Image (cartoon, grey):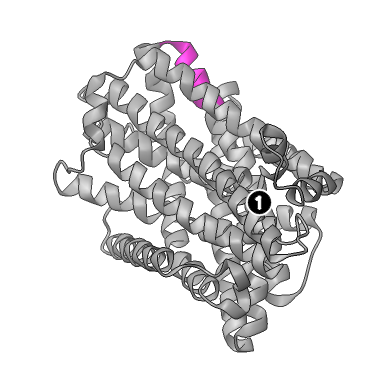
Amino acid sequence: MTARAAEVLAQPQRRGLSRIVPFLGPAVIASIAYMDPGNFATNIQGGAQFGYTLLWVILTANLMAMLIQNLSAKLGIASGKNLPEVIRERWPRPLVWLYWIQAELVAMATDLAEFLGAALAIHLLTGLPLFWGAVITAVLTFALLSLQKRGFRPLELAILGFVLAIGVAYLVQVVLARPGPAALGGFVPSFAGPESVYLAVGIIGATVMPHVIYLHSALTQGRIPTRTDEEKLRLARLNRLDVVLAMGFAGLINMSMLAVSAATFYGKGIADAGNLETAYRTLTPLLGPAAAIAFALALLASGLSSSAVGTMSGQVIMQGFVNFRIPLWLRRTITMLPAFAVILAGLDPTSTLVLSQVILSFGVPFALVPLLLFTARRDVMGVLVTRPLVRGLGWLFATVIIGLNGYLLWGAFLGHSAPH
């Protein structure tokens, strides 16, 4: 596939799907971070409490994600290195080690949320105790990660399969829930009181996940060799299409989650609908068992795929920052332990998901700021250096996201509920 992509890249006159398909994949893997179990909790809570009001927030967050993930992909193409490697090469050693420690903590928080989401889905579907759901999740994730031994394409296709499964599951739920024309009003910016503002902060502030910024640059570095500046420019354009398609689909899924929740739960007086287990139990009497099963299957696909992606991110973080690598199975085993500890301690999975997102919010500036700094440097990016307008938008989005994450963190310290 790499040879085919390089051949297509060298023949700009080629048109049609045969020109595009070889370049699709990295953004599909990255997009999983935007459909992880934490998004389920936030979107369901937003729809249940405020109807369609916050649909515009999801759209805004998705546009931010497109720009940031595109910059990460370009860094990998332009430099042939991932973001942690660039930081290691160009920043002082003590700062690099600080970055590595915080990035590892962020990776563990990421994996905790995603692993718990998949274990909870298995529990909902089968009735097995949460512990055995976690054991099955571990086995399935190991199997998924083993695809990496066959090259990047099998894993990309497997992740694509999970993404499509989530899409089909939510298509079923949209058909069953039948959101009304009032949903269109949700794209007009507005709020429904202070609580809706706080939830909107959660949706935007925790949308861009730091681990996937690191990962996306690794997925494009050296994936398809380029020999000239023209080929780099052409590859960057095709990767931009990959980002728009993958992130656009993720945005549609998130909007569907909120719309289904609004059509099903809003105004029905259902307490704690943002709790994933409550949402599942309530869907059956309201929309029928098909909707509940589709919800749980989507959560399972989300948890398994995002857990695998989280483990991949951890590998990139360790190799990039400290030039050290451990076997993937060992990393997977280590990052599973906090999830098993949470389950054995009897903690609520949804509440733990929320806490993990607060930890993730702390890592956002560490990934965003160097990404924007390095993609603005011609000695790093060459012909792919960001233009002033894109640079300005990037810093605007970064300021908004970092500010909102700070707000979330402050709210958590004050004891407020912090949405994903």
Q: Residues within 10 Å of mark 1 (few under 14, many from 20)?
A: many
Where is 365 relative to 190, above or below? Answer: below
Q: Is residue 70 left or right of residue 14?
A: left
Residue visible at 56% across and 43% down in the picture: 32
Question: Is 302 or 152 nearer to us in this picture?
Answer: 152
Place of residue 382 in the rendered image (x, y in percent of width and height, measured from the top left):
62, 73
User: Which quarter of the rendered picture does the N terminus lie within?
Assistant: top right
Any part of residue 299 in sight: yes
Q: Secondary structure at mark 1?
A: helix
Q: Is residue 142 magenta?
A: no
Question: Is 303 or 226 nearer to us in this picture?
Answer: 226
Question: Is 188 or 212 nearer to us in this picture?
Answer: 188
Question: Is 284 or 66 nearer to us in this picture?
Answer: 66
Residue visible at 41% across and 46% down in the picture: 62
Place of residue 330 in the rendered image (x, y in percent of width and height, measured from the top left):
78, 57
Place of residue 15 in the rendered image (x, y in percent of width and height, measured from the top left):
67, 37
**What residue occupies the far left of the structure in this picture?**
193
Q: Is residue 380 left or right of residue 372?
A: right
Which amino acid lies under the numbered mark 1 shown in the image of this protein? Met
Q: Which residues are magenta?
A: 288-297
Q: Which residue is disc 1 drawn over?
A: 336
Q: Is residue 301 left or right of residue 9?
A: left
Q: Is residue 290 magenta?
A: yes
**What residue occupies the far front of the structure in this picture?**
13
Residue visible at 70% across and 43% down in the picture: 13
